Amino acid sequence: MNEIKIFSPATVANVSCGFDVLGFCIDTIGDEMVIRKTKEKGIKITKIVGADLPFETEKNVASVSALALYNHAKPDCGFEIEIYKNIKPGSGIGSSSASAAGSVFAINELLGKPYNQTEITNFAMKGEAIASGCEHADNIAPALFGGFTLVKSTTPLKVLQLPTPKDLFVTIIHPQIEVKTSESRAILPKDIPLQNAITQWSNVGSLVHALHTEDYNLLSESLEDVVVEPYRSQLIPHFNSVKTEVIKAGALGAGISGSGPSIFALSKGKDTAEAVAEAMKNVYSKTEIEFNVYVSKINTQGMKVL
Amino acid sequence: MNEIKIFSPATVANVSCGFDVLGFCIDTIGDEMVIRKTKEKGIKITKIVGADLPFETEKNVASVSALALYNHAKPDCGFEIEIYKNIKPGSGIGSSSASAAGSVFAINELLGKPYNQTEITNFAMKGEAIASGCEHADNIAPALFGGFTLVKSTTPLKVLQLPTPKDLFVTIIHPQIEVKTSESRAILPKDIPLQNAITQWSNVGSLVHALHTEDYNLLSESLEDVVVEPYRSQLIPHFNSVKTEVIKAGALGAGISGSGPSIFALSKGKDTAEAVAEAMKNVYSKTEIEFNVYVSKINTQGMKVL
């Protein structure tokens, strides 16, 4: 196999109470990438469609992560990468992670899978680092492992694959505004009340239990973030209205996707997820802000070879 | 049935990362209680063996909780309670909870089980409140539900029963020193670093996943408390030595039981749990402090009718 075409999925990180550790994978939004072996050694980006991103190997997350794997594997060939972006950079649904993870996944396939998922994740984190300033696996882990993931630690990297209830759907609204990563970080307090922390870890424990037992009611009760959302939601116009309306429409819960501005809501069943989409549209239609809305089953596979 | 004899188990609360929410039930340590119907109405403590505790109905946790149930059920009889204490008050393994939970469990049995476990837990919390100053279910929930429990919330009360890996044993050392509840509370900070909170809820999520998947390695990695133990362990002499030695002896992890002074360690298999007991004894034998050491399977049943 000299060439591979893949679907690299969008992802939701910072799932409610699981700030910095819990994410899941989306099925209907993702980039496509074509990676092919070349006689010429090295990593080269040859095509980028759909976004204004750098072609230089050391500046594009996809080639930086690819290079990390490449320098480790030292194969007897090179690789060229074509990127077809469907996930808008800055949307909060793992755009850079899809690029960073997609290239290493694809090259690993072309090389006959010398690396396991955790090793690939480590390489992908090198690419993510140039986009976000630090190596984290919040979006990379769900993109590569699929389903719900819990990043237990990053040094050493330990990713847990959590079970995904089979009727679980996500609805996402991406309001087309810019939320600066620096601002969404600066707004968080360094210290938090112990009582809030206890509520949060109680919710995290309950959420993991709910996923294992397919208990949608408990999942709903656990989708509560008393630590981060009260701060970051201030940066997303109409966040509270969206949250109120999607719950009315039957969603199990809602929260900020990544560091925003996208908002996600989880629902049991596609019909509810689509009613939730309508509720989201209704809120933002009354504003001047442009937006996209997506409905997706939770993607339990992660990357897909097309 | 006019009389019942029960075993009311000791319990471990504040299990490592799960401060204030996670507990489990012990099999080999517990009180015995005899409760019998009387023609005379009301609740009366008629016998207390093994501890110096009040006989007045409104001062003993067992009768206070019993009274909460009694006033709700309004039965056509009264009850007298005999308490045979084996769990030393102030040991940190749920002495007051065993009394508070035992009486309501037994009376509920004698009345033909009109109340479910959550309702009984609520009554028991009324008794616990006079011992600890606030209504909490940290020890009561595992005593009544058995196995590992996660108290998701207390108002309204929501207790989750987590699965218990079948080879899991606990070793407990009770150093016979007094740790004042007021002091163990005062030593905790009101605010904690967000980074520590994230580590903690990552561990809680991992621990719940480990219980569901019977993953002893992950359980071991998750038994880490970066929030409370660094403070409270200062109140327990030789805590760090005990922890170091039990890990060397093969324990999966160790921590403070409740608010101390007892220290618990979890192990896979009875042999390891007994080696851990020896390691604990070795540390404390070199000191002037008297101690008891117990080894127990995790009690998945909770209360037992004898």
Image (cartoon, coloured by chain):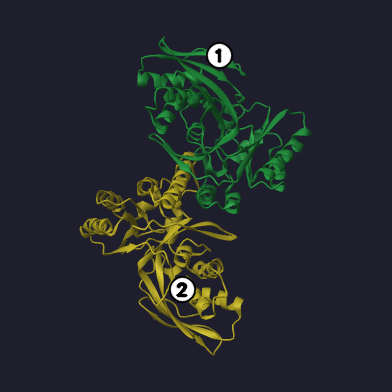
Chain colours: A yellow, B green
Q: Please state which of the two labelled residues, at mark 1 or mark 2, is closer to the viewer.
A: 1
Residue assigned mark 2 = A102
Does residue A79 appear in the picture of this structure? yes
Drawn side of residue B176 relative to residue A110, left or right: right
Which of the pair B60/A255 is nearer the observer? B60
Vertical placement of residue A44 versus A262, above or below = below
Drawn side of residue A257 relative to residue B60, left or right: left
Drawn side of residue A68 relative to residue B289, left or right: left
Residue appearing at x 42%, y 56% in the figure: A184
Position in image of residue B51 (x %, y %): 61, 18
The image quadrant where one finds the N terminus of chain B is top left
Which of the pair A264/B44 is nearer the observer? B44
Which of the pair B167/B174 is nearer the observer? B167
Residue assigned mark 1 = B47
Mark 2 residue type: Gly
Q: Quadrant of residue B260?
A: top right
Label 1 lies in what chain? B
Vertical placement of residue A41 versus A282, above or below = below
Position in image of residue B203 (x %, y %): 54, 49
Label 2 element class:
helix
